[in-house]
Each structure stands twice: as structure tokens, then as C-alpha cells.
Amino acid sequence: MVLSTRHLLKALLPINSACRTFFGTTRFSAHMMVSDPIINQKHSLSEDDENIASKKLCIEPRVKRKKCAILLAYSGQGYLGLQRNKGTKTVEEELLLALKSKNLITDEGFEQIQTMHFQRAARTDKGVSALRQIISLLLPEEVDKQVINSALPEQIRVLDIRRVTKGFNSKNSCDGRTYSYTCPTFAFAPAEATIDFNYRIDAIVIDRINEIVKSFLGCHNYHNYTSKKKPGDPSAQRYMVSFSCDKPFEKDGVELISLYVRGQSFMLHQIRKMVGVIIAICRGVAKHDVIERSWQPDRLDLPIAPGLGLVLEEVHYDKYNEKFGNDGMHERLDFVELNDQVSEFRAKYILPTIIKVEKEESSMQLWLEQLPLHTFEVRTEHRHMRTDVNEINSPGLASLQAAAELIEKEEQHSINDTNTEVPPDNLSTLADAAQAMSSEKN
């Protein structure tokens, strides 16, 4: 019997469906029971992938931040300056640790402070304090200063936090800075006066101080009042806006006096050298004309006063306040309403430290004893010693001068001698100086 094609297809269709069902199920079951090594290798997570995945889970939520200005007061006693220097104790390190502990900055912001636009208005050196230092950085919109203070030492206080413009930079936006230098009044006593805490300054000496400080007003070349600055360097030109001596006051049996100087900017050690010259003139160790001579290209031997009494009083933002202080969105940065808090901090942490250290270490008295060792002339010899140092009753300093002179001669000889192969041994030179001094005594 011959089947037509139509009848043949009808007969084969059920068989075809059953085969497809059977082989499809078998293939699916085999795939489920036997794993494909290629597929496993392709989709398995490596350790690096797992670490990345875990990091993604730990990403901190995005926090909306705004540029802020922190008003910071601190006593620099016990700190190696303001600026952060990893491995050392600085004021900035304390502040950053406090911000991190309160989750106000991220780990990345703590390690790389430039990521949060961190900037200080002025650097202060070892032992130098500040009453109105300004720090600009990005912070969360809602920040409580008391939260930060709870994680800071008592000698470092956040006095206020204010919202500023997006482009504000605490250093570049300021118009000037005011510093004060506070010390016992006996520092300015005439040469014939007794140097102790019983000394009391009179109006004649105060008038003399105010007359001397006028010589610093205006724009001058301050290359002699810092280090590693050449006379022709344009950055040595600095402008002093005001300089005055305040009235003396007494605290804990010590009469103190403060000098206030405002300038557009200052260089390293500049104010301390200015104060050193003023004291030297009042004491009769130097003549008034040394200030005029210091503007000239010659390098003079000028003293540097102790850093203990130096305080950053205020950072000025006159142009910023004029432009943004009354725009309805930003506050002024003069902080006049916080003057009482500033005065309290000065009385509690800064003045007692100056008196305590002066009584225990006699830093100003010891410095005054060494003041006559400076020549106030062009540096032709060792910069810290006079040629007549042996006439002063200070054998230790005389030995130091002798050693310094020998070292300089040895170094100069090694520079001039192009054939020398052995560098000068400064320790041997010191030993030679000590032996020479011993021979002179015998």
C-alpha cells in the first residue's frame, strides 16, 4: 500500500515530538548535573573582585559639603608649629584628628587634605600662638563647633564656623595680618637698669619704643629679617601698615607689655628680628640707624627675639567683607562679636604660659645676656659672635666662637683647594678649638 506524503507526516509527527521531549529533557538534566569548567572559570570571582565588591559595600554615603571658615585659637606651647608634618606634634594634626573622629572629614580627606580644599591663613612656628587663625575647608552643611571641641585639647579651641563663598581661600583672600609680641617690660629697660621682675617701665621708655617702631612703617626690603632671602629678591619687599606699643599691664607679679604690628604679609622670623632690633636699640646695644642700614643690600648680623611671646592676633578680610559680608547669604569675617571669647582665651592660656615659661626658664633674661654678642654690622665673621667676645665673661661662648671661626676657615680652605679629596672634619676642628682654649687658660 502506498502512503501519501500527508499520511506519512501524520504518522511520524507523534514520534518526532516524543524524541524532542526526551532528548531535550536529558540534555537539560545533564547540564544541571555536570558543571561546565569553562563557564565556571569565566564567572567565578577572584580575590581582587571580592575585595572590590566589599569596598563598594563600604563606600561612605555622599555628604553635601560647603566651603567654611573655622576661627581657631590655640596656644603653641608644646607644638612644633601649626602646619601639619606627619610624625610630629602640630596644631593642624590635632584639628584633623578631631574632625576625622567626628566623621566630619573622610579618611581620604584626612590623608590628602587638598581634596577638601584645606588652607591656613598664616603659618605659625614652634611655640607661636594664635587668637584668630582662619582655616578654610569643605565641611558638612550642619557642623557644631562644640562637637569638634570635645575632641580637641583645651589649649586648642574652635571659636566659630562660618559659611563662605565657594572660591574663598583663607590665605589668598586675606588683606593683611596682625601679630602681637608680649614680653616682660624689663626687656626694654636701659642698660644701667637691673634686669628682674621688679622692674617697672616708665613713659619715657614707652615713647622711645613708639618712636623706634615708626621706622618700620611703609614698604621696605626685609631681606635682613629672614633667612635665605637675597637682597634683590622682589619677595623681600614687605609693607607694614601699623606698628605700636600698647600700655603695660601686670599679671602674677610680672609687668608685661605688647607690641602690635599689622602688615600685608610676613616672612619667616621677620617679626622676631624686628622686635630684637627694637630691644637692642632701647638697651643701647645698637644705634637707631641700624634699621635704615638693614634695608641696604649688605647682610647684617641682627638678633632674633624668643618666639614665646609671638601671637597671631587677627587675619583681615576687608575686601571680602565689603563684597560678600552684606549679601544676605554670608557672614562677615571680622568676628568682632567674639572679642570677649578671644580675651578669655588669651587670659587663660596664652598669658599664663608666657609668665610660667619666663619664670621657669628665664628665656628673655638669657637672651638679653647674649644680645651684646651681635655686631649689627656687615657679616664678615661668624654671624652670632663679636670680635671682642673674650672680653665678656662667657668662656663657653668664647670657645664656641673659636670653634666656629676654625670651622669656617677649614671649610673655606677646602672650597679653595681644588685638589683636596678629604672633606673637612668639623668634629676634629671643634676638638682643636677646645684644645686651643685650654692652652690659653693654662
Image (cartoon, rainbow, N blue to C red):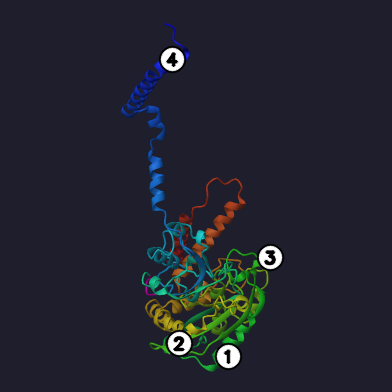
How far apart, in angstroms, are the residues tagged by discs 3 and 1? 34 Å
Lower sequence index among marks 1 and 4: 4
Quarter of the figure with residue 320: bottom right
Closer to the chain start, of discs 2 and 1, is 2
Please give the range of residues in magenta. Answer: 152-156
Task: Judge whether residue 264 can be spotted in this image.
Answer: yes
Secondary structure beneath label 3: loop
What label sits on residue 194 in the rendered view? 2
Residue 155 colored in magenta in the image: yes
Q: Where's residue 1, x and y in %?
A: 42, 6
Q: Sort mark 3 into few (<14), some (14-19) or many (20+) by Cα contacts within 10 Å.
A: few
Q: What is the quadrant of residue 318 in the picture?
A: bottom right
Which residue is more in the foreground, 180 or 402? 180
Number of residues whose C-alpha sits closer than 10 Å to that of mark 1, classed few (under 14), some (14–19) or many (20 or more):
few
Q: Few, some or many C-alpha atoms within 10 Å of disc 2 (few <14, some 14-19, many ≥20)?
A: few
Amino acid type, residue under disc 3 in the picture: Gly
Q: Position of residue 154 (x, y in %)?
A: 37, 75
For the C terminus, give its image quadrant. bottom left
Mark 4 vs mark 2, foreground winner is 4
Q: Amino acid at mark 2?
A: Thr
Q: Vertical placement of 202 versus 441: above or below?
A: below
